[in-house]
Amino acid sequence: MHTAAHPLLPPVPDLPVWRVLDTRLKLDRLYGLWQAWRDMPARPRVLHLVAFTDAPPKREQLLAAATPAQAPVANELSGAWIGLLPGLHRFLLDGGRFQLTLCVGELQALLREQRFEADAVWFDAALAWDRHRLKALARCSRRGSVLSGLAADTPLAAALREQGYVLQDAGWRHDPPWVTRARDAARRSPAPVGRCAVIGAGLAGASVAAALARRGWQVDVLDAATQPAAGASGLPAGLMIPYASPNDSPRARLTRAGLRLVRAEAQRLLRSGEDWGPGGVMELRPDGRGGLPHDWSVAGAELSHPVSSDGHEAWRAGVPAGDAVWHTQAAWVKPALLVRAWLAEPGVRFTGGSDVASLRAAATGWDLLDSSGRLLATADQVVLANALGAPGLLASVGLTMPPVHGMRGVLSWGLHTPSSTSLSPPHPINGSGSYIPHVPAAGGAAWYAGSTYEATDGPAATRSAHLQADLDKLRRLLPATAAALAPEYAAGRVQAWEGVRCVSSDRLPLVGALQDAAPPTLWISAAMGSRGLSLAMLCAEWLAAQMGAEPWPMEASLARSLQVQRGR
């Protein structure tokens, strides 16, 4: 039995994505919207709700407001309802197809941070509306968007008409007469859902493939290697962790936003304790550099908070005194398993052994060719996620991108011995290098230490030199653990994993359209550096949002830090 049509859902659900804006978060509206969307016999593949609040409800309120039928989404939401600092927070719910963007703070300022046009708006008349707030709201409304929750005889009628809202069939719609139809059609038009080719099957490419497939795209992922995650994403174990800085820099805010998204993916796709360990990570700063802002809020402390040496069990392993931060949402992950899970999404097809050497403009998109000119694939849209290989492919079509370079890294690892087990902390430690203990592996529990960071454009150090550098880092980070492992290094029993990271000049990813012409059909998501686990899904969701004219997963002012053309 299907529920009655919801006023904020399309009467004819023929769109792959539906975008709803709620000017004040109400849990009954949130749950009612989700349930009505779920009950539609043919619904949009993805439902976006962008909701605003100056005081997020408590976790217990989330659960109390839901009916038994709504409990699945309420439980999912409550599990991620943490660290709601001022700004935007994206929640991937119901398999990533119900996306809540919670905007915490002052309404007008946050409306100006949006870069999408809503299909439907819930207008809360109890808020203090003035011309400036209404103008900001109108910027987030497309022609024809429905405005619900407001009577026809509202005292705000004149102000609404001034911003392009008109009464039609006793309801308000946005229909600004001063915007021409041609101009209206040209701006922020979503790319028609079709076929997309993603070049590169690491974290960057696989996350893009999954994000697009959920929106109905047929995605071909091509890689020169025969297996996914053959490059730096094949790291046997890595950390998803936020970056902490005293001034809460864009890098810190981006990694927090990315961590929220990738945790949701790991919880949905991976086995806890086997494929990933969500128990938190301690960050050490023995030199006193870094750390959290001095005015860090209660909401922020839910995510990251200072810890002292007194009584904390990690310090029994000989951790040196100094600044330390506990990241509650950080985790260790086996990246290759996350890559494979994303590539297993319906609508994604991986083809290994496909070395794309050049691109060629086609009638409706792009041809992807190998070095002999053989056609590998044809697609409407192409996303470059092939790290250091991206500049060469762009050169084949006369385009350029900001410079990227490779940084070689060697990770030390081995199986725990009784000595290393007793002198290892119970959770990962991050700082100058990292140490990840007690990771299930073939033959027992493994530890991982490192890694090094060496430019690929200079002379390469020997593997033994890299391993020694890992041990030296570990001595500064965890002296007692390093002492227990030193005999393993000396005896040559420590193994090494080597990979090359792709980094940009400012060590932030490069994401977005590579063409100035509209509509763009060539995109990039690359240069994740050492933070691919924390940033890949954020970059993927932002790329998908730009391609589909959807709500962005972060503030527009913050997104500029990732924009591929930011240096121009």
Image (tube, grey):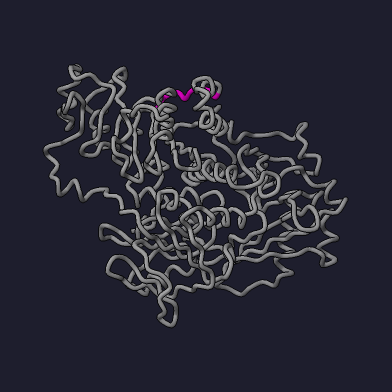
- Which residue occupies the extreme right position in the image? 418
Residue 126 image point, x, y percent: 31, 17
Residue 279 image point, x, y percent: 68, 40
Classify the position of the N terminus by image quarter: top left
Q: Is residue 83 visible?
A: no
Classify the position of the C terminus by image quarter: bottom left
Residue 430 image point, x, y percent: 66, 48
Question: Is residue 400 left or right of 346 when viewed as pictured?
Answer: left
Q: For the magenta stretch, what is the residue range?
A: 53-59
Decide which of 457, 278 is in the foreground and name it: 278
Residue for point 67% across, 42% down: 282
Where residue 171 sits, quadrant-wise, is top left
Q: Main secondary structure of the magenta part?
A: loop
Question: Is residue 285 left or right of 407 when viewed as pictured?
Answer: right
Where residue 175 sits, quadrant-wise, is top left
Where residue 458 sits, quadrant-wise, is bottom right
Decide which of 88, 305 is in the foreground and name it: 88
Residue for point 78% across, 36% down: 313
Give the vertical position of 304 relative to 417 (above or below).
above
- Which residue occupies the extreme bottom position in the image? 372
Q: Is residue 265 visible?
A: yes
Q: Is residue 56 magenta?
A: yes
Decide which of 323, 566 is in the foreground and name it: 566
Q: Does the magenta stretch include residue 85?
A: no
Residue for point 83% across, 51% down: 420
